[in-house]
């Protein structure tokens, strides 16, 4: 791992969160749930703004680690939301607060989107021949792509000089091209990234 990143990994926050803070966190995730048209991962730029930049409830390294661990682990990628809630709670001083953070963030991100998805899917299926429904589905694709690019930008360059991160950008571009142009399984790319990180190339 890059030596410059190690101090950030050791950084621990000590928060004093009141019930109003937990309520605001829940409302934030309720709102993000309705914006997560490409899945919860597409709203990470707003999560970063709220948790890291605005409220300072997570460090940059905790934010990145939450996403990286959830993406590497088996299961749905929405687990990164639980890890963010856990880290906010642990930063607030206890394991019970960590469990509360998991409950608040996961309920907030899942409740509106699953309810809306269920109702919209039923309506969309009944009206799938309407031109407006087909146009809506096609119009969502560029929005999702833009949100995912914003997520990559945040994870790759937040808090760092972009010029000094050129190896990360190069690996990201090469990986995107390989995924686009080949049928190579993504686990091979994850393994290659792990090897590059192990030997401090990125």
Image (cartoon, helix red, strand yellow):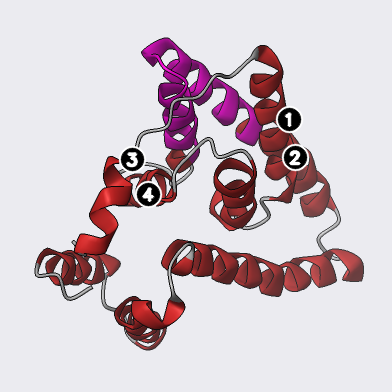
Q: Name the mark nearer the viewer: 4 or 1.
A: 4
* Residue 27 coordinates in the image, percent (x, y): 73, 30
Label 1 belongs to which residue?
27
Label 3 belongs to which residue?
11
Cα distance in 3D space between marks 1 and 3: 27 Å
Up-down: is 17 above or below 33? above
Within-10-Å neighbours for mark 3: few <14, some 14–19, many 20+: few
Q: Name the mark nearer the viewer: 2 or 4.
A: 4
The quadrant in which the N terminus is found is: bottom left
Q: Name the mark nearer the viewer: 3 or 4.
A: 3
The label number, if any, that marks residue 61 in the structure image: 4
Side of 135 where 41 appears, left or right:
left
- Main SS category, magenta section: helix
Cα distance in 3D space between marks 2 and 4: 24 Å
Residue stretch rendered in magenta on the structure: 81-109
Cα distance in 3D space between marks 2 and 1: 6 Å
Picture quadrant where residue 150 is located: bottom right
Q: Is residue 73 visible?
A: no
The quadrant in which the C terminus is found is: bottom left
The verdict on residue 104 being magenta is yes
Within-10-Å neighbours for mark 2: few <14, some 14–19, many 20+: some
Q: Name the mark nearer the viewer: 1 or 3.
A: 3
Mark 2 or mark 3, earlier in chain: 3
Q: Residue at x 77, y 52 (%)?
A: 125
* Label 3: element kind: loop
Q: Name the mark nearer the viewer: 2 or 3.
A: 3
Cα distance in 3D space between marks 4 and 1: 24 Å
Label 2 belongs to which residue?
31
């Amino acid at each position: 791992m890059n030596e410059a990143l190690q101090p950030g990994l050791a950084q621990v926050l000590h928060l004093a969160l009141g019930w109003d803070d937990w309520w605001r966190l829940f409302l934030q995730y309720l709102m993000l749930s309705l914006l997560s048209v490409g899945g919860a991962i597409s709203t990470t730029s707003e999560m970063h703004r709220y948790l890291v930049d605005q409220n300072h409830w997570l460090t940059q390294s905790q934010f990145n680690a939450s996403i990286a661990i959830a993406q590497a682990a088996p299961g749905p990628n929405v687990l990164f939301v639980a890890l963010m809630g856990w880290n906010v709670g642990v930063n607030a001083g206890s394991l019970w607060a960590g469990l509360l953070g998991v409950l608040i963030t996961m309920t907030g991100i899942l409740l509106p989107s699953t309810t809306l998805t269920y109702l919209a899917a039923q309506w969309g299926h009944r009206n799938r021949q309407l031109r407006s429904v087909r146009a809506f589905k096609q119009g969502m694709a560029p929005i999702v792509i833009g949100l995912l690019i914003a997520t990559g930008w945040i994870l790759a360059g937040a808090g760092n000089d972009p010029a000094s991160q050129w190896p990360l950008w190069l690996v990201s571009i090469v990986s995107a091209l390989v995924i686009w142009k080949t049928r190579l399984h993504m686990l091979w790319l994850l393994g290659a990234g792990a090897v590059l990180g192990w030997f401090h190339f990125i």
